[in-house]
Amino acid sequence: GGGGGGGALRQHVSVDTVVQRLANGKVETRFEFSPCPGRHVLRYRGQMLMVERQREQQTVDLQTGQPWESVKLTALGRSPEVFSRFLSEAQAHASSKQEQTTTIYTNWGTEWRPFGAPRRRRPLSSVVLNDGIAEHIVGDVREFVESQAWYIARGIPYRRGYLLHGTPGSGKSSFVAALAGSVGYDICMLNLAEPGLTDDRLAHALTHAPPASLILLEDIDSAFLKDRDPRDRRASFVTFSGLLNALDGVAAGEERLLFMTTNHIERLDPALIRPGRVDVIHHVGDASPSQIRRLFLKFFPDQTDQAGRFVTAMEGCTLSMALLQSYLMVKRHSADGACDGAAEFAKGVRESRDARAMSTLNMGSHTGPVAGAAESGTGTVLAGGSRGTTGGAAANTDSSKRPTEHVDD
């Protein structure tokens, strides 16, 4: 912007154009104004501040391509209190823009880097688990996050491990993503089969995760395949003993929240899921009648009679929640249509299971929001847990050796 004639006050600003492409294909554009490089004078809480922006011309941020810059603040007086208040308000303003998003990190060499733009947080209510399971895990995580001083006072390593196991398409990863958003955490995704990954890099990654983030190891059962060629340079060099040491060895990091998923818990070595490495285990299986009903009501709120009819039509049908959601996406415009086609759909599932069952539908070109995921079965709480009672599972961490406790959900 600018002023009038000679001697008039001028204000020089920089304009950043932010373009965002939405999921529906639309493009939104907004303009963000900031003081341009140079000196600026402003009044803050009745006090004059001079702000000087200096932009480096030789060095740039390798991720964004923008040049590095420094900001110098100058004020009259001897107390730095005005700077503390000013910077605190600026930090709070910047954080408010990110509080509704979840950042996904991946491991690059010896550091964690954001993978793509921050994602909009997924509501925890959008993931349909079997009765009581989501509440138990969320309560356990929240209690762990708030119990750091309690762990330190008793000399217990401040880390917590969770294992979700069950059939593909049952919602294990979806629940972890929604959970992270619920507690305000980001997600660090680590692939143990990553080419070139070594025991040292793995230990470093688990120890130096970004603050307020959980670590996700997906398909943990596929990390140590027996038929892998050790001469293959594209293979991971992580050993099983290296993973165990990274989880709870002498050099293992603390302040860690770790989630592992697997489709085949029977393939896991008992040493991997013993208490101290994995503290909570939940089975995430095919859709139960309760999940079928609640997912139906997500698509068709207040249609309780139709929900009962739909559950009855699906009785005796074994299917994943991902497949059920695909069916409801096709029928989302009519609760009656969903109920009328349920019997035929269930018959197709019984005869041919997931993939070929969808061939009975005319999928068309419908697209829309994802509304659910799944879980069913029992949960197991192991040693090293929370300091109280969470979701019906008593956990006394004053003793590191105690029986495994089962929670029937």
Image (cartoon, rainbow, N blue to C red):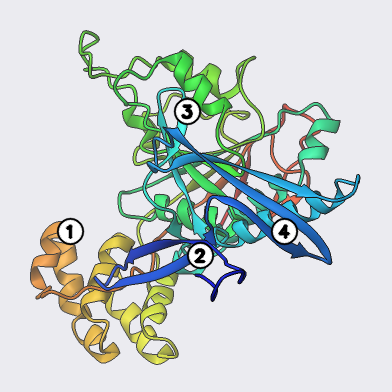
Q: Which mark is residue 33?
A: 2
Distance of mark 1 from mark 4, alpha carbons?
56 Å
Image depth: mark 3 or mark 2 in front:
2
Hey, which residue is sitting farthest front in the picture?
6
Query: For this rendering, which residue is in front, 181 or 163?
Result: 181
Amino acid type at mark 3: Glu
Pointer 4: what residue?
89
Mark toward the start of the polypeptide (3 vs 4): 4
Task: Give the secondary structure at mark 4.
Answer: helix
Tags 3 and 4 in contact by the CB under 8 Å rule? no
Mark toward the start of the polypeptide (3 vs 2): 2
Mark toward the start of the polypeptide (2 vs 1): 2
How packed mark 4 is, by other alpha carbons closer than 10 Å (few <14, some 14-19, many 20 or more), is few
Up the image or down, 97 lies above or below 245; here it is below
Distance of mark 3 from mark 4, alpha carbons?
29 Å
Pointer 3: what residue?
111
Tags 1 and 4 in contact by the CB under 8 Å rule? no
Task: Give the secondary structure at mark 2.
Answer: strand
Rendered image quadrant of residue 258: top right
Up the image or down, 328 lies above or below 141; here it is below
**In percent of the image, x 39 and y 55: which residue is there?**
171
Query: For this rendering, which residue is in front, 146 or 22?
Result: 22
Image depth: mark 3 or mark 4 in front:
4
**In percent of the image, x 48 and y 25: which residue is there?**
270
Image depth: mark 1 or mark 4 in front:
4
Pointer 1: what residue?
353
Tags 4 and 2 in contact by the CB under 8 Å rule? no
Task: Give the secondary structure at mark 3.
Answer: strand
Amino acid type at mark 2: Phe
Distance of mark 1 from mark 3, alpha carbons?
42 Å
